[in-house]
Amino acid sequence: MSQKLADKRSFLIAHSNGIISQAVADRIKAHVSSAQIYFANDGMDATMKVNTSHPNIIIVERFLPKLDAIKLIHWGLETKSLRSLAYIILSEIPNEQQFVDEVVLGGVQFLEDWSNDVKLAQSLSRALNYITHKGRSRPEVGGD
């Protein structure tokens, strides 16, 4: 059974700087009505919040302490119950290829400037679209 969009407006912001986390949360609330927002200040806290709060979209600092964004997302993609989550990494697009299939499908995005309202709104829109439409029937990607 598919959840309604309103039920999927649950976000986890994983960032080591509380001021930035709150600023991102304020911008989310300006763009997404009825958003439920959770916070984590390191990667281990983020994994706990994912398991207890069940967010649909994770916005994560690239070099998050204790478990960086890349490892956090790999963990999410390898956990069957978490594969339909959308991820927005607060970072420039890396030189090395990371999550190519997921980026193409829209499940992973890189956002260089979280303070740019237009870019943030576009990323949020793509993430909400992904979890509403593509996340339900996401094909297996990667692996051996």
Image (tube, rainbow, N blue to C red):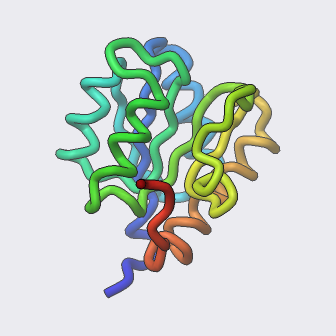
Number of callouts: 0
Looking at this view, is 104 or 90 the one in front? 104
- The quarter of the displayed image where residue 13 is located: top left
Can you say which quadrant of the picture contains the C terminus?
bottom left
**Identity of the residue drawn at 38% across and 83% down:** 2
Horizontal side of 5 relative to 92 (left or right) equals left
- The quarter of the displayed image where residue 143 is located: bottom left
Looking at this view, is 11 or 137 the one in front? 137
**Identity of the residue drawn at 51% across and 73% down:** 132
Q: Residue furthest bottom?
A: 1
**Identity of the residue drawn at 55% across and 23% down:** 62
Looking at this view, is 63 or 28 the one in front? 63
**Identity of the residue drawn at 52% across and 46% down:** 87
Horizontal side of 114 relative to 2 (left or right) equals right
**Percent from the top left, x then y, of residue 41?**
36, 19
**Percent from the top left, x then y, of residue 24?**
58, 31
In the image, residue 99 above or below residue 64? below
Horizontal side of 103 relative to 77 (left or right) equals right
Can you say which quadrant of the picture contains the N terminus?
bottom left
Q: Residue furthest front?
A: 144
**Percent from the top left, x then y, of residue 117?**
77, 39
**Percent from the top left, x then y, of residue 135?**
48, 70
